Image: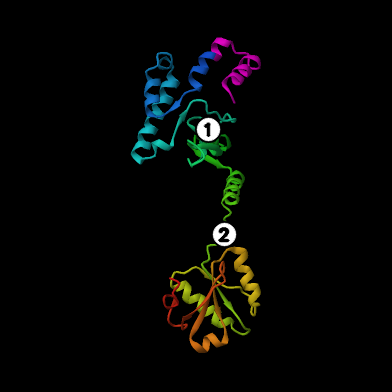
């Protein structure tokens, strides 16, 4: 919201004088890092206010820690930031998602707040029979907004969103191969490969392949009676539907299959 609109509300609805609103406006339009905090600590008006000095002192300490962590460039001290709840007793913050600079934009673009919170030392004590003070810091995350941004990003890149981390599905081409599938899945797990199978006793091969396409599993290891006799497993790449035969025995492990 432009400052002039904020000022109009402060004067017209909140009853502040234009002079007071202008003095507030001198500060709320400022944002920066440690250098700004040090300047404000030297401000003759703010230095006369004990709460302002204490707050700026806390912010200076925070930014000194941020510098030690090497993340001060990602944090901005924004004096216009405000939260709509009155139980905060210290620092408040928001996380803004930044769209990186690309060939179409000259600078990074903010796409909105995705999280917010702050410190509230008196809230928990309100529910304590003895009224004990319990220092707290909390944050709320905008899950729906994050999902919406992720979906927009995926649509723009035409990239299919995977709903699983599974690397390979162990499938069977014929019936009565449940035990063989279970053994192969176990071998893959022991080799650190993320594998799974459909837990029906005799699933149809088409259903198993469709499951991979729906969930984004990139590889299928297909077992059949002939493959077991020949000591091989058929590896199918789901996206291209290309198939190769790999030497394999249930005692060899996944490394011999070439899917490490």
x, y percent for residue 30: 47, 23
Q: Is residue 36 left or right of residue 201?
A: left
**Which residue sits at x=39%, y=36%?**
72
x, y percent for residue 202: 64, 80
Residue 232 got which mark? none
Residue 29 position (above or below residue 209): above
Q: Earlier in the sequence, mark 1 or mark 2?
A: 1
**Which residue sits at x=65%, y=74%?**
206
Residue 113 position (above or below residue 252): above
Instruction: Tell how many labels.
Output: 2
Residue closest to the eye, 125 or 4: 4
Q: CA distance from mark 1 to mark 2?
A: 43 Å
Asked if the stretch drawn in magenta spans residue 14, the answer is yes
State the SS at label 2. Answer: loop
What residue is disc 1 on?
122
Check disc 1: other Cα within 10 Å, few if <14, some if 14-19, many if 20+.
some
Q: Is residue 186 left or right of residue 38?
A: right
Residue closest to the eye, 205 or 198: 205
**Which residue sits at x=60%, y=51%?**
155
Residue furthest to the left in view is: 68
- Examine the residues drawn in magenta and state their main secondary structure: helix
x, y percent for residue 23: 51, 14
Residue 144 position (above or below residue 180): above
Check disc 2: other Cα within 10 Å, few if <14, some if 14-19, many if 20+.
few
Residue 162 got which mark? 2
Of circles 1 and 2, which is in front?
Answer: 2
x, y percent for residue 168: 52, 70
Q: Quadrant of the C terminus?
A: bottom left
* Among the 4 quarters of the image, the one containing residue 1: top right
Magenta-drawn segment: 1-21
* Among the 4 quarters of the image, the one containing residue 162: bottom right
């Amino acid at each position: 919201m432009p400052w002039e609109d904020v000022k109009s509300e402060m004067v017209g609805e909140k009853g502040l004088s234009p002079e007071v609103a202008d003095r507030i406006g001198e500060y709320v339009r400022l944002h920066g890092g440690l250098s700004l905090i040090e300047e404000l600590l030297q401000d003759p008006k703010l230095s006369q206010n004990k709460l302002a000095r204490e707050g700026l002192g806390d912010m200076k300490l925070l930014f000194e820690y941020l510098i030690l962590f090497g993340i001060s460039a990602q944090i901005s001290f924004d004096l216009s930031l405000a939260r709509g709840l009155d139980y905060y007793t210290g620092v408040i913050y928001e996380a803004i998602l930044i769209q990186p600079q690309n060939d179409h934009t000259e600078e990074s673009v903010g796409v909105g707040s995705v999280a917010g919170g702050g410190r509230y030392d008196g809230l928990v004590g309100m529910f304590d029979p003895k009224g004990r003070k319990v220092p707290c810091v909390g944050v709320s995350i905008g899950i729906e907004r994050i999902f919406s941004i992720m979906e927009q990003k995926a649509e723009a890149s035409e990239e299919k969103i995977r709903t699983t981390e599974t690397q390979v599905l162990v499938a069977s081409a014929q019936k009565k191969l449940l035990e063989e599938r279970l053994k192969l899945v176990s071998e893959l797990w022991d080799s650190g490969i993320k594998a799974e199978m459909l837990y029906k006793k005799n699933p149809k091969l088409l259903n198993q392949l469709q499951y991979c396409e729906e969930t984004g599993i990139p590889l299928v290891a297909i077992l059949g009676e002939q493959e077991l006799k020949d000591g091989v497993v058929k590896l199918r790449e789901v996206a291209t539907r290309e198939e190769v035969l790999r030497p394999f025995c249930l005692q060899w492990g996944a490394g011999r299959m070439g899917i490490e």
